[in-house]
């Protein structure tokens, strides 16, 4: 096995209300429900982006999980409220269209579409649980050319965030070209 054989299969997001999260990811973003199970008495749902059916995002509520202590549940809830617990970054062909769609659906806007110094265009929203969702339209050197060892001219921006809450005016999210 080489490192080139590794692919992301699944990731997990903590959510306050599984039904609200499911409605957002399924009905607003158009994700497909892949699995719905109960584990340790806790309902879990995995969704997949239509363009990546092999990549699952597990939506799970820690508040209903009997294996999570009340103290840990409160800590998780506090981090979620501040937008510091989870975030996802999606690649899109049309950042402005995604922005208009999510804004019309009532998603909480964190950043309107902007063009970064490396010519990537992106915007950001919060999901119903406060997880940050960033939508990036990369400016690749050649149309439909993705970064690879054969085409190293594109290097994705790296992202960092401050310890401040990622909501409204206190949102501190910057992207720097490599």
Image (cartoon, grey):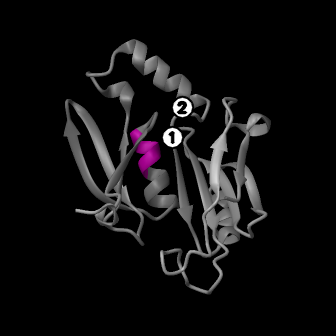
Count the labels in the image. 2
- Residue 23 lies, in percent from the top left, at 45, 52
Quarter that holds the N terminus = bottom left
Above/below status of 135 relative to 77: below
On the question of residue 107 being in view, the answer is no
Q: Residue at x 70, y 37 (%)?
A: 167
Give the magenta range.
18-22
Choose top left, top right, bottom left or bottom right for residue 122: bottom right
- Residue 135 lies, in percent from the top left, at 61, 61
Checking the image for residue 86, the label placed there is 1
Quarter that holds the C terminus = bottom right
Q: Rounded to the nearest whole Å, what is the CA distance between mark 2 and mark 1?
A: 7 Å
Circle 2 SS class: helix
Q: Earlier in the sequence, mark 2 or mark 1?
A: 2
Q: Nearer the viewer, residue 25 or 157?
A: 157
The answer to whether 142 appears left or right of 87 in the picture is right
The residue that label 2 is drawn on is 80
What secondary structure prevails in the magenta region?
helix
Mark 1 neighbour class, 10 Å CA radius: few under 14, some 14 to 19, many 20 or more: some
- Residue 143 lies, in percent from the top left, at 61, 87
Task: Confirm or deny contact between disc 2 and disc 1 (CB under 8 A).
Answer: yes
Magenta segment: does it hold 61?
Answer: no
The answer to whether 56 appears left or right of 126 in the picture is left
Checking the image for residue 66, the label placed there is none
Mark 2 neighbour class, 10 Å CA radius: few under 14, some 14 to 19, many 20 or more: many
Q: Residue furthest bottom?
A: 143
Magenta segment: does it hold 20?
Answer: yes
Q: Nearer the viewer, residue 88 or 81?
A: 88
Q: Residue at x 67, y 74 (%)?
A: 139
Q: Nearer the viewer, residue 4 or 71?
A: 4
Choose top left, top right, bottom left or bottom right for residue 95: bottom right
The answer to whether 28 appears left or right of 34 in the picture is right
């Amino acid at each position: 096995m080489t490192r080139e054989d590794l692919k992301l299969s699944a990731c997990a997001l903590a959510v306050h209300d599984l039904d609200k999260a499911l409605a957002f990811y399924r009905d607003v973003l158009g994700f497909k429900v892949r699995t719905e199970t109960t584990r340790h008495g806790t309902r879990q749902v995995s969704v997949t982006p239509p363009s990546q059916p092999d990549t699952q995002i597990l939506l799970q509520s820690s508040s209903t999980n009997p294996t999570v202590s009340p103290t840990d549940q409160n800590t998780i809830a506090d981090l979620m409220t501040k937008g510091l617990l989870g975030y996802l970054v999606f690649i899109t062909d049309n950042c402005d269209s995604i922005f208009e769609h999510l804004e019309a659906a009532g998603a909480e806007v964190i950043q309107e579409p902007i063009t970064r110094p490396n010519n990537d265009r992106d915007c950001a929203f919060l999901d119903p649980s406060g997880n940050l969702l960033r939508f990036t339209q990369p400016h690749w050197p050649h149309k439909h050319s993705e970064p690879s060892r054969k085409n190293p001219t594109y290097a994705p921006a790296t992202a960092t965030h401050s310890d401040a809450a990622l909501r409204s005016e206190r949102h501190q999210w910057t992207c720097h070209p490599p």
